[in-house]
Image (tube, grey):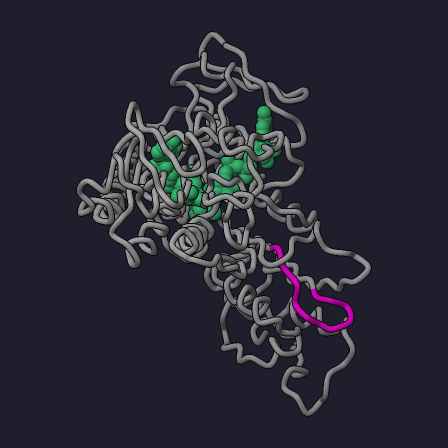
Amino acid sequence: MDKTLDVIIIGAGSAGLAALREVHKRSESFLLINDGAYGTTCARVGCMPSKALIEAANAFHRRHSFDAFGIRGAAALSVDVPAVLRRVRALRDDFVAGTLAATDELGERSLAGRARLLDAQTVAVGERRYHARRIVIASGSQPVIPDAWRAFGDRIVTTDTLFELETLPRRMAVVGLGAIGIEIAQALSRLGVEVTGFGANPRLAGLSDEAVDLALRELLDKEFAFHTSASAELSPAADGIEVRSGAVRVVADQVIAAIGRRPNVAGLGLETLGVELDARGMPPVNPNTLQIADLPIFLAGDANGRAALLHEAADEGHIAGINAMATELRCFRRRTPLAIVFADPNVAVVGQRFADLDAAQLVIGQASFKRQGRARTAQHNKGLMRLYADRNSGRLLGGEMCVPAGEHMAHVLALAIERELSVQELLRLPFYHPVLEEGMRGALRDLSAQLPAGSDSDLASCGAYKVEALD
Ligand SMILES: Cc1cc2nc3c(=O)[nH]c(=O)nc-3n(C[C@H](O)[C@H](O)[C@H](O)COP(=O)(O)OP(=O)(O)OC[C@H]3O[C@@H](n4cnc5c(N)ncnc54)[C@H](O)[C@@H]3O)c2cc1C
Ligand SMILES: NC(=O)c1ccc[n+]([C@@H]2O[C@H](COP(=O)([O-])OP(=O)(O)OC[C@H]3O[C@@H](n4cnc5c(N)ncnc54)[C@H](O)[C@@H]3O)[C@@H](O)[C@H]2O)c1
């Protein structure tokens, strides 16, 4: 192709499609190049099929509380695992179909093939060359599988292959207990698989607060076996794979590798850009513009290794797409950090992580949900929320939790942190009764008690009854 395009976008995932939307608003001169399956990681093998599996597992797990409700016959219920997996794939196909609409109508402006940079303005796909004023790289990430593990063939499963299984084996080991490992381990265990989890990290699910981690451990301990703080190694066994971690040895039929995701930058030609690459082969990227160094090229989404989350990928595609068409680059303020792991109860980290805060400047408020009134009515009463506020200003800084409906409360807290609200300002909001958010109010009141007293003509100081049914 001789003509110079306005923009080339590499990757038709969530970041690439967000970039495409912004570029297409401003120009007809672009090319979207995608290697491999279309439909985005999120819809095809990520967020959506994993949540479909989790919902099935949680629905079946609910039978354990039936007796307490006075509902009999739960022991007679069974799960049809192949049917569960068929539903996951059917939903997945529907979600994927929705994303395909974004590229279907592009005609020649969409190209299937593996893109390789020749310089900051030239891309090769096979023998063909394409030139553009700006390039957006949004090539995503892929599951890490150590080379030695590949020898185990299809006994090693990743989230790229899990949802394709027709059924589940009797025994599965889940190696890596971050977001993916915890979500999948709990779901598989709830569907009747004998799960053993292995995590090198001493904490689960990306938590950094030891107290919340401990609360989560106590809950998960009742569901499946797991071992942390040691790396897992695999070796062949007569009837499966032996997983070793410290003194623990477990044989599983299949092993799920959930040990992280690696940006798809190998073979992309980043070395042709003339900028220094770090030990992971990554170039310097400005998180507010997504520009690589001072080049006419942008790196967005999982591909930049910053935060492998859907809303961040969408934001980054948006920023990169706008800047790829701009005469002057714009700096974007990034959102308050928010990470949710869809375990039951939900794990969430919002705002600043506990580990990143200065303990001397901090007050910590906490609330256990073990006796929380509304949670008790639903047999969901478990978990712990810890919130962190600045000792001097009373401003909410962050929180970590494993609590029922944590996915929703974390959003409320993110809004408060984004708006720089203080604990007193949050306590001025209405809390309806009886709601799970009253549990969150407990943690806020705990914070408030450690901060300088506010005015007593202010409803923020309206205290607890200290009566479970009313708080
Ligand atoms: C199991 C799982 C569960 C998840 N759950 C959640 C969740 O609940 N919430 C959440 O926020 N996030 C979740 N995520 C993360 C989320 O899915 C990702 O952050 C997001 O999908 C990344 O989008 P992306 O556009 O950066 O990459 P992708 O969607 O992977 O798109 C990249 C595209 O680029 C293509 N490509 C790669 N190299 C080249 C090349 N050289 N040339 C051309 N094309 C190329 C790829 O084939 C792909 O099509 C989950 C991820 C997984 C795996
Ligand atoms: N709900 C969500 O938002 C969600 C869900 C799934 C995935 N994701 C995204 O996908 C990304 C990748 O998820 P992930 O869970 O694979 O990665 P992760 O980096 O979150 O966790 C991987 C874990 O594996 C451990 N590990 C590495 N090698 C090991 C070994 N040999 N033995 C035992 N443990 C080992 C690491 O210590 C780490 O804790 C996440 O960072 C997240 O951004 C998000």
Residue 156 vertical position relative to residue 458 in the rendered view, above or below? above
Residue 64 visible in this rendered orientation of the protein: no
* Nearer to the camera, 407 or 462: 407
Residue 270 visible in this rendered orientation of the protein: yes
Residue 37 vertical position relative to residue 441 in the rendered view, above or below? above
- 94 displayed left or right of 407: left
User: Which residue appears farthest toward the bottom when viewing the image?
Assistant: 457
Quadrant containing the N terminus is top left
Quadrant containing the C terminus is bottom right
Q: Which residues are magenta?
A: 389-400
Residue 220 x/y as whole percent: 56, 41
- 198 displayed left or right of 329: right
Residue 104 x/y as whole percent: 19, 44
Residue 452 vertical position relative to residue 315 in the rendered view, above or below? below
Quadrant of res 400: bottom right
- 37 displayed left or right of 314: left
Residue 331 x/y as whole percent: 52, 59
* Nearer to the camera, 95 or 336: 336
Residue 443 x/y as whole percent: 65, 66
User: Which residue appears farthest toward the top when viewing the image?
Assistant: 238
* Nearer to the camera, 60 or 284: 284
Question: Which residue sits at x=60%, y=75%?
Answer: 426
* Nearer to the camera, 396 or 239: 396
Question: Which residue sits at x=56%, y=37%?
Answer: 283
Question: Which residue sits at x=68%, y=92%?
Answer: 457
Taking the magenta stretch, the answer to whether it contains residue 73 is no
Give the quadrant of ligand 1.
Answer: top left
Residue 264 vertical position relative to residue 151 in the rendered view, above or below? below
